Image (cartoon, helix red, strand yellow):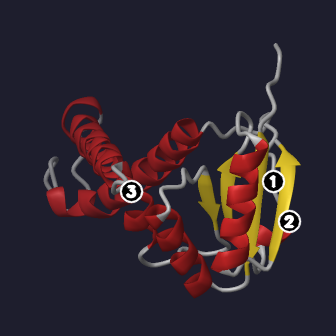
Amino acid sequence: MSTTHKEVLYGLYNDEVELLNAVKQANADHLDIMDVFSPFPVHGLDPLLGLEESRLHIAGFIYGAMGTLTAFLFMSWVFTRDWPIIFGGKPYWSVPAFVPITFELTVLFASIGMVVTFYTICGLSPTRANPTLDDRITDDKFCIAFDTNDSSEADKEKLRSFFSTSGAAEVNTKMV
């Protein structure tokens, strides 16, 4: 399997406000942003990048409903068909007694299902190498990255001048 490398030109910003202003400027200049990295979620960044709302919560609801049905139907089958024993004066089918286990399986199915779905969608696995542009992005820096693989030197110079006018603290190029 051959690996293709991408040349990425990126700028580091010290503050999320500078990042937001730079993204607005890049949109106004019609620059094609490859990605934006930040050490924490930045309010208002998603609409600027044209990102839609995640549908992960729909998957979470479906997984939770599966957990609820699994718990409730399994306990109903066990206590009415497979092992019908009256204990403590309760009837065979005692719904209030099912609530704690039903809740726990709802949470368990939803959480495990959402993690697996998230990892699958993002292409994450323990065997996948995660190329990072700069180690400081996960600590205290904010980053805008441009794919410059097929760009001319004039386009690269235009991006460098964008970074200098938008307040980037540092501009680097890296092959990922």
What's the residue at 32%, 50% (across, down)? 64
Residue 91 placement, left or right of 171 = left
The amino acid at mark 2 is Asp
The tag on residue 132 is 1
Q: CA distance from mark 1 to mark 2?
A: 7 Å
Relative to 133, is 169 above or below? below
Is residue 90 among the parts visible in the rendering? Answer: no
Q: CA distance from mark 1 to mark 3?
A: 23 Å
Q: CA distance from mark 3 to mark 2?
A: 26 Å
Relative to 78, is 59 above or below? below
Q: Choose the circle earlier in sequence order: 3 or 2.
A: 3
Relative to 169, is 126 above or below? above
Tell me where residue 7 appears, x and y as whole percent: 79, 42
The residue wearing badge 3 is 50
The residue wearing badge 2 is 135
What's the residue at 47%, 54% (across, down)? 111
Residue projecting furthest to the top:
1
Mark 1 in CB contact with mark 2 (< 8 angstroms):
yes
Tell me where residue 110 appears, x and y as whole percent: 40, 51
Is residue 11 among the parts visible in the rendering? Answer: yes
Which is more foreground, mark 1 or mark 3? 3
What's the residue at 32%, 60% (across, down)? 103
Residue 125 placement, left or right of 96 = right
The amino acid at mark 1 is Thr
